[in-house]
Image: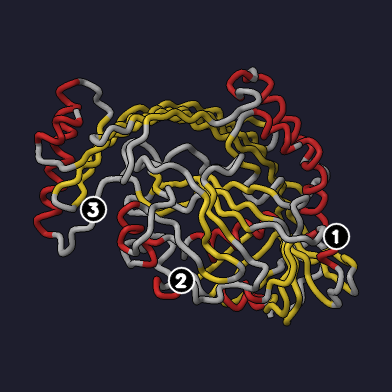
Amino acid sequence: MLDGATAAGANYADVRFETQHAHRIEVRNGVVATLADSVSTGYGVRALVDGAWGFAASSDLSDAQLDRTAARAAKIARASASIARRRIGSPPPAPYVDTFDTPVVRDPYDVPLGERVALLLDAERLLHVSPEITVGRAWLDLWRTDKTLYSTTGSRIAQRLRHTGCGVEAMAVGDGDVQSRTYPGDVGLYQSGGWEIVEAAKLLEGAPRVAEEAVALLRAPQCPAGTFDIILGGSQMSLQIHESCGHPAELDRVMGWEANFSGTSFLEIDQIGKLKYGSDIVSIVVDNALPAGMATCGYDDEGTKSVRSDIVRNGILAGYEMSNDTARTIGRDSNACVRAQSWEYVPMIRMCNLVLLPGSVPFDNLFDDVADGIYMESNRSWSIDDRRLNFQFGCEIGWEVKNGKRGRMLKNPTYAGMTPRFWNSCDAIGDDRSWFAWGTPNCGKGEPMQTGLTTQATAPARFRNVAVGVGYA
């Protein structure tokens, strides 16, 4: 097949064979609303001709179709080269022959279906702590992907990636209001691994608490508007990193090659080593070998080995999420951030595992030295401009903080800011005991749109003098 691409004129080609298994169960108000299994098998071919890429894919595994698909990828590349203004495409610098298998303690497919369903029914039932809970949901997702990459330079990389996620949501209606709470985070708990992730989520323990909070929010006072010190819980910090660092640090957005779904970026290449992105305690790395990370793998979809590299170091912009082509354009090496949703999609730069390095402050001590502030948990809404600069986030729940102590519950907390100013106001980050890998299973990018798996590992953090409650002022 690769010989066929070469015979058709390709200077380089790779092919990625994939089989994806997906399993989902969702329980809603005591009924199994979704019970679905799917399997998808196919392959995608990338061909490079005169510095331009072509891509073609098929689910037909016959010899004749393999050759046609390879030839079509080369033909598209040749057509692209004929109109390209610049020649930028180049093969990955090193071939690898290797395997990678996501570490799993217990294969979730070994857990009987009846046991999976019973857990969700029990968790959902525990959400109904009051007649005001009108909707209860509990869900489980299992994904397993087997992929093998071959290239004309000699790579042969076989990987088995396994991901598991689950969560619950309670919606309360009353007093002319609607409030909801989710658990463990606002999208649930998603990590790479097996059934041990479901066990760690402790749905049966968390469900009654968040349901009671949803009911209490109906009669909680409105979060005040003004300038406050704020403390953000871990799951909200996850989205804060995702939107205000992860997307703007994708180098294809920085270079103006990509703008779908998250716009371009306020970061500029000549700002590396200069831009004061955050305070001195803010260090963010991309780590595609992170244990439990949703983007964790041995190699990306270009065949580049996973590495750890700086995005922000001690508050200074230090790097980007990169592919081979974009990295070489700025004189660097790829940090393995290229992914495709599945075999039929072209690989592109995706946010992977971003890690805000933990600080030294125990979680309870983040409240110290806060005279008048707000603690917020779990995202409910967000808005951010096309350059990822101006943002506003809304959270599910908040508590006032008075003289270092957490006080009464507050509904509809929101906060807003400018990305560098906000991160420069960070003066405390939780220690490694409150640090956690929060997975995002549904990051959108590209046209046609692809769904990516990301993780933001973080601890809760404190920010000074932040605009709060702008939307309710």
Task: Give whichever of discs 3 and 1 has the lower sequence position.
Answer: 3
**Label 2 – label 3 distance at C-alpha:** 23 Å
Residue type, label 3 = Gly
Is residue 448 or residue 175 the one in the foreground?
448
**Label 1 – label 2 distance at C-alpha:** 35 Å
Whether residue 378 is visible: no
Q: Look at 71% across and 46% down and name the residue there.
A: 183
Q: Look at 63% across and 36% down and name the residue there.
A: 139
Secondary structure under badge 2?
loop
The answer to which image quadrant residue 313 occupies is bottom right
Is residue 106 or residue 173 the one in the foreground?
106
Task: Give whichever of discs 2 and 3 has the lower sequence position.
Answer: 3
Residue type, label 1 = Asp
Q: Circle 3 sits on which residue? A: 89
Residue 159: give x, y in percent of width and height.
44, 30
Q: Circle 2 sits on which residue? A: 272
Residue type, label 2 = Ile
| Mark 3 Cα-neighbour bin, 10 Å: few <14, some 14–19, many ≥20 | many
Q: Circle 1 sits on which residue? A: 364
Q: Quadrant of the C terminus?
A: bottom right
